[in-house]
Amino acid sequence: GAVVSQHPSWVICKSGTSVKIECRSLDFQATTMFWYRQFPKQSLMLMATSNEGSKATYEQGVEKDKFLINHASLTLSTLTVTSAHPEDSSFYICSASQGAPGLAGQETQYFGPGTRLLVL
Amino acid sequence: GQQVMQIPQYQHVQEGEDFTTYCNSSTTLSNIQWYKQRPGGHPVFLIQLVKSGEVKKQKRLTFQFGEAKKNSSLHITATQTTDVGTYFCAGPSNTGKLIFGQGTTLQVKP
């Protein structure tokens, strides 16, 4: 149980295009989903926290107009990188938790397999 | 702000040697979680510790939560090449998110 999928697993795009990444909890309802970015040999950097039906909460320094998050249902959250540039190239990982909003950090997070984005 | 620090950053061991990574939080934690990320992979949940002084074992892995609930350790006995990866500790913040340590990358020489 507790499987999270992410699609696509990797994407190469031209600078200026937008890329949408999907995160799905396959066998449980995820009250909260998290989006992380990880650069090579670094830890996970939380970008935003999203709860179904409400606006995402972005971490300091993360542009909400550039990284659009939609949490349409209890099993699906999407991250859209708008007008991607080479510096946006990274490993984007989502995670899902059954923790209530504001308490999701208390619960185990189940990570998706990640999406490697390369912007040329 | 709240910080979770991990040492060492890297550790190279000979297969069969033991390995330990340490995690320290700037604040008291309600729980601590450990994750493993294989090279090229994503973090996988290993364990959660909740009680002060708690010790849990998973085969050759021993996890410990400090009495003050501000530090934790992961000890691997007799490492194997399959143990290679980066081990992250993480603790919940008071705003409901998980704060990850920098991770300890383990390399095992066969």
Image: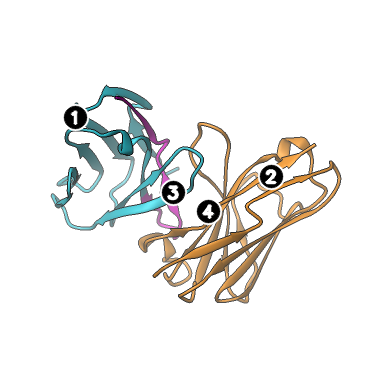
Chain colours: A orange, B cyan
Label 2 to label 4, Cα distance in Å? 13 Å
Quick check: marks 4 and 1 in contact, CB under 8 Å?
Answer: no
Q: Is residue A110 left or right of residue B72?
A: right
Q: Nearer the viewer, residue B80 or A59?
A: B80
Do discs 4 and 1 belong to a common subunit?
no
Query: Does A38 sit above or below residue A35?
Result: above
Q: CA distance from mark 1 to mark 3?
A: 22 Å
Question: Compared to A100, does A19 lie above or below?
Answer: above
Whether the residues at callouts 2 and 4 have beta carbons within 8 Å, the answer is no
Chain bearing tag 3 is: B
* Secondary-structure class at tag 3: strand
Residue underneath mark 2:
A117
Magenta part of the chain: B91-110
Front disc: 3 or 4: 4
Residues at circles 2 and 3 in contact by the CB criterion of under 8 Å:
no
Q: Which residue is mark 4?
A: A113
Give the distance between the C-alpha atoms of the residues marked 2 and 3, in whole angstroms.
Answer: 18 Å
Q: Position of residue B87 (x, y in %)?
A: 36, 40
Q: CA distance from mark 4 to mark 1?
A: 29 Å
Q: Does the segment drawn in magenta span residue B92?
A: yes
Q: Residue flagged by tag 3: what amino acid is it?
A: Pro
Q: Amino acid at mark 4?
A: Pro
Query: Within the image, what quadrant is residue B76 found in?
Result: top left
Q: In the drawing, does residue B31 fall left or right of residue A74?
A: left
Report the amino acid beneath label 1. Asp
